[in-house]
Image (spheres, rainbow, N blue to C red):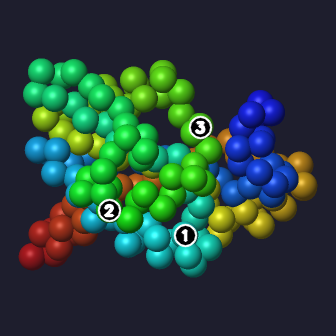
Amino acid sequence: MTEQVRQELGGDVDELGPVDWIVVEFPGSKFRGEIAPALDELVEQGTVRVLDLLLLKKDADGSLEAFELADLDESEIGALRSYEAELAMLLSEEDVEAVAAAVEPGSTAALLVWENLWAAPFASAVRRAGGQLVASGRIPVQALLAAIEADEQEGD
C-alpha cells in the first residue's frame, strides 16, 4: 500500500475492514442527495466509513463530467457535504473512466467507496492467522427478488 493511501486512511492498516464500492445510477440525472440520511445513519452507527465519493454526470451525447463534493452545491448533494473533509480520494482517473462506461447517457451516478467497519475485527483476525481473501461476491437484491418471484410462480 502506498504511503499516501496509508496516511489518508489513517491508523493501522492491519486493522482495516473490507472495502467495497458501488455505483448507483439515477436516470434522467435526478440525483438530489436523498441518500444522505441513510448513509449518515450507517456512519453514525459505526457500520461503515466513507472513503471516497464521486458524482458522475453523463450527458445525452455521452460526454462525462466527474465531480468531487466540493464541486457541487447543496441542492445536488444535500447532507453528503459533511463527508468532504474525511474522504481519502482513493479513486484514480482510470477507475472513474471504467465506471463511466457502465453509466447510461443522460444519467447521474454516485460512486461510493466504503470500509466495512463492522467486519474489521474479523478481517484483522483472519490476517493475523495468516489467512487471505481468495474470493468474494455479492448477490444483487433484484436477483433475490426475481428468484423469490420465480419460486412463487412455480408453486401456483
Q: Secondary structure at mark 3?
A: loop
Quarter of the figure that contains the C terminus: bottom left
Q: Which residue is mark 1?
A: 43
Bin the neighbour count of mark 1 within 10 Å (Cα to Cα): few under 14, some 14-19, many 20 and up.
Answer: some
Bin the neighbour count of mark 3 within 10 Å (Cα to Cα): few under 14, some 14-19, many 20 and up.
Answer: some
Instruction: Name the residue: 56% across, 76% down.
Output: 44
Q: Amino acid type of disc 3?
A: Leu
| Depicted 100 relative to depicted 119: above or below | above
| Left or right: 135, with 110 as reference point | right
Q: Is residue 111 visible?
A: no
- N-term mark: 1 or 3: 1
Q: Is residue 32 visible?
A: yes
Instruction: Name the residue: 38% across, 65% down.
Output: 79
The span from disc 1 to disc 3 (Cα, nearest Å) is: 18 Å
Where is residue 70? Give x, y as percent.
Answer: 43, 45
Where is residue 104? Give x, y as percent.
Answer: 19, 33
Nearer the camera: disc 1 or disc 2 = 2
- Relative depth, front residue between 8 and 74: 74
| Depicted 92 relative to depicted 145: above or below | above
Q: Amino acid type of disc 2?
A: Gly
Numbered circle sitting on residue 90: 3
Q: Which residue is mark 2?
A: 78
Where is residue 152? Give x, y as percent.
Answer: 17, 73
- N-term mark: 1 or 2: 1
Tag 2–tag 3 contact (CB < 8 Å): no
The span from disc 2 to disc 3 (Cα, nearest Å) is: 22 Å
- Relative depth, front residue between 101 and 72: 72
- N-term mark: 2 or 3: 2
Q: Quadrant of residue 54?
A: top left
Bin the neighbour count of mark 2 within 10 Å (Cα to Cα): few under 14, some 14-19, many 20 and up.
Answer: some
Q: Secondary structure at mark 2?
A: helix
Quarter of the figure that contains the N terminus: top right
